[in-house]
Image (tube, helix red, strand yellow):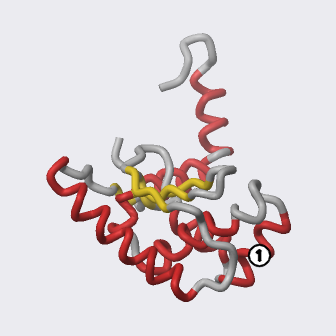
Amino acid sequence: MAPRNIPLTYADEIIDHRSSWISKRKLDSETKIAIPPCAPEDKKIFAARVRQKASEILLKYNGKLPKRVFIRFSRTSWGSCSTLGNISLSGYLCHLPDELFEYVVLHELCHLYHMNHSAEFWSLLGRLLPEPKLLRKKLGRYILPR
């Protein structure tokens, strides 16, 4: 729907000019994968799965380890790293393919060295995983429950 104060011919021109962008955004929104919300009674099961899979990754990891690992059911983030050296992982990670699960865990572990997304951060992550920015893009297809 166009604003009332612009001529329809102008609106048509804008739509024609941006048609490829509009089509791409429409396709992107159709290819999103919504993660189902977790029932309260299932949170312990999902948290245990995430903790187990994360532990397996941590056992193979040769770098700085977190002081503690928390499992939370955040609606906004797959993971985070605190300046205290703790990482939090989403309980919803158990719904992701293994490569994305590993990406999130290693991403947070790299924040133990670089608390930002600098070139050094991406270089470190790139030494741990092939094509981390491609994995980030794949992760963007998944939507956390609201």
**Looking at this rendering, what residue extends furthest in the top direction?**
5
Q: Is residue 130 visible?
A: no
Q: Position of residue 113 (x, y in %)?
A: 76, 65
For residue 65, above or below residue 59: above
Q: Which residue is at the far right? A: 119
Where residue 108 sits, quadrant-wise, is bottom right
Q: Is residue 67 visible?
A: yes
Tag 1 secondary structure: helix
Query: Residue sitting at 58 percent across and 57 percent down?
Result: 86
Q: Nearer the viewer, residue 84 or 11?
A: 84
Can you give x and y, in whole percent of width and height, for residue 66 in the image?
59, 65
Q: At label 1, which amino acid type do we have?
A: Leu
Task: Give the residue furthest to the bottom.
Answer: 60
Q: Which x, y percent locates residue 33?
A: 37, 60
The residue pinned by badge 1 equals 124
Residue at 54% of width from left, 12% of height from top?
Answer: 4
Q: Nearer the viewer, residue 79 or 9?
A: 79
**For residue 27, side relative to residue 137 (left or right):** left
